[in-house]
């Protein structure tokens, strides 16, 4: 399992098929691994959120959900770059496809009221053999409620899913999963953000061509301008400076190795 370090995170160097296969092997062993899918917005947030950053750094599976991260890896790592963007929603679809043929179970938690149940139905329609053992949409603020946390843990304990799709927004989903994974009777935990609502058909996805050239953010901005304009047009602009710093750091590191006569690993 090859990995590539960017922004202090160890990204999995793999395509979506290989990533899904590795996650399923982990799920079969009930290893309770948290899968995170950092994008440009996440990288910016992690600069200030120390707790979330530590969770992302400790995650066994870190996949790049953003073409700018793939492009940056090509600049800094050449032939060792990330082969493709692994969108969290696409990874969820691939995992459902594979698990439907292997007898593994999945559960959906998150999204607006009814979204998780609808996502489960949509996924079983696409993958008739898929075993959906549970769906639940926790109320707003559930992460701060002891009763709601215990209720969700109890539900997951009853379901015993091999893979839990958890989408309540970053960094809430990663923090809750990290804090409570020891009590969860589940295998792999994939943090999918709005992926559950996308799977349910409640949110429109960008065309594939827009996804492939790194313009999914623009599509989302056009769909929800009032909610997302500040994130994409102001907050995430900080990524340009962070990327420049990463390029400079990798360049200096490479030159240091060359000057010392060592080979880069």
Image (cartoon, helix red, strand yellow):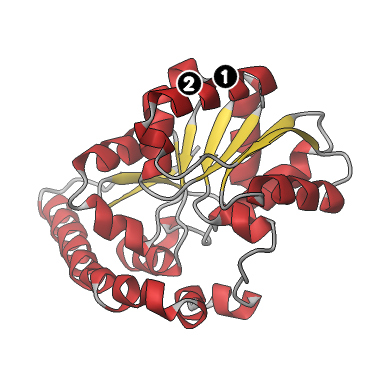
Residue 193: x and y, percent?
Answer: 49, 52
Residue 232: x and y, percent?
Answer: 34, 74
Q: Name the residue carrying label 2.
A: 150
Q: Is residue 235 visible?
A: yes
User: What crowding class fits label 2: few (fewer than 14 Cα within 10 Å), some (14-19), or many (20 or more)?
Assistant: some
- Front-most of residues 115 and 178: 115
Q: Name the residue carrying label 1.
A: 154
Q: Going 57% across and 30% down the picture, which residue do you hit?
A: 188
**Left or right: 162, with 211 as reference point:** right
Q: Secondary structure at mark 1?
A: helix
- Whole-angstrom CA distance, mark 1 to mark 2, is 6 Å
Q: Going 84% across and 37% down the picture, which residue do you hit?
A: 101
- Is 158 rendered above or below residue 79? above
As drawn, the label of residue 98 is: none
**Left or right: 198, with 252 as reference point:** right
- Is 255 rendered above or below residue 168? below
- Front-most of residues 17 and 148: 148
- Is 252 rendered above or below residue 234? above
Q: Is residue 59 visible?
A: no
Q: Going 40% across and 59% down the picture, which residue do you hit?
A: 39
Q: Are marks 1 and 2 in contact (CB under 8 Å)?
A: yes
User: What crowding class fits label 1: few (fewer than 14 Cα within 10 Å), some (14-19), or many (20 or more)?
Assistant: some
Residue 259: x and y, percent?
Answer: 10, 55
Q: Going 42% across and 80% down the picture, which residue do you hit?
A: 225
From this viewpoint, which residue is outermost toward the bottom? 222
Q: Quadrant of the C terminus?
A: top left
- Front-most of residues 183 and 8: 183
């Amino acid at each position: 399992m090859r990995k590539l370090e960017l922004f202090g995170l160890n990204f999995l160097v793999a395509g979506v098929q290989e990533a899904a296969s590795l996650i399923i092997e982990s799920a079969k062993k009930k290893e309770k691994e948290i899968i995170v899918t950092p994008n440009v917005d996440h990288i910016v947030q992690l600069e200030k959120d120390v707790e979330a950053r530590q969770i992302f750094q400790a995650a066994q599976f870190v996949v790049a959900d953003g073409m700018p991260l793939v492009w940056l890896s090509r600049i800094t790592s050449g032939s060792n770059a990330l082969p493709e963007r692994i969108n969290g929603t696409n990874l969820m679809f691939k995992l459902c496809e594979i698990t439907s043929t292997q007898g593994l179970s999945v559960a959906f938690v998150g999204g607006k009221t009814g979204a998780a149940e609808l996502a489960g139905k949509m996924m079983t329609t696409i993958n008739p053999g898929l075993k959906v053992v549970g769906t639940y949409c926790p109320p707003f603020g559930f992460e701060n409620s002891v009763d709601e946390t215990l209720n969700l843990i109890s539900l997951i304990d009853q379901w015993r899913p091999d893979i839990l799709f958890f989408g309540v927004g970053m960094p809430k989903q990663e923090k809750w999963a990290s804090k409570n994974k020891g009590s969860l009777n589940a295998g792999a935990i994939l943090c999918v953000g709005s992926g559950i609502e996308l799977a349910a058909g409640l949110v429109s996805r960008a065309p594939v061509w827009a996804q492939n050239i790194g313009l999914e953010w623009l599509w989302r901005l056009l769909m929800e301008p009032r909610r997302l304009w500040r994130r994409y047009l102001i907050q995430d602009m900080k990524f340009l400076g962070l990327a420049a710093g990463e390029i400079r750091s990798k360049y200096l590191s490479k030159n240091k190795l060359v000057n010392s006569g060592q080979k880069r690993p």
